[in-house]
Image (cartoon, rainbow, N blue to C red):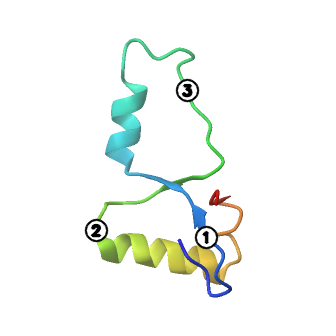
Amino acid sequence: MVFTDGSRRWSILYTPERLLNNLSRPDIDPPGLHMQQLIVVRSYEVDDIERVLNVFDEEDKLIGASREYPE
């Protein structure tokens, strides 16, 4: 993501299905995960992603849901 101030950040986008698929693997150990930059979206449709990112931005949550992009 590129913010209006020119800074660049990134997040990992997952759908519920992708999250379920990853957590359903029999070899996952521990049987859970935690990622601070994880955003779960309904679908990978551009409109859904843009809506989520815009709402997070309006609520000042997007910085916390993303990481600084390494130069």
Residue drawn at the location 57% of the way across and 17% of the way down: 30
In this view, the residue farthest toward the left is 45
Tell which tag, 1 or 2, sits nearer the viewer: 1
Comes first in the chain, label 1 or label 2: 1
Give me the disc on residue 40: none
Q: Which mark is residue 32?
A: 3
Q: Which comes sooner in the sequence, label 3 or label 1?
A: 1
Q: Is 11 displayed left or right of 27 in the figure? A: right
* Residue, far front: 71
Question: Hey, what amino acid is under mark 3?
Answer: Gly
For the residue marked with disc 1, what is the amino acid? Arg
Q: Is residue 21 above or below residue 63?
A: above
**For residue 61, what is the image quadrant?**
bottom right
Q: Earlier in the sequence, mark 2 or mark 3?
A: 3
Alpha carbon distance from label 3 to label 1:
29 Å
- Residue on which the image places disc 1: 8
At horizontal 68% and vertical 86% (from top left) the residue drawn is 5
**Dots 3, 1 in contact, CB < 8 A:** no
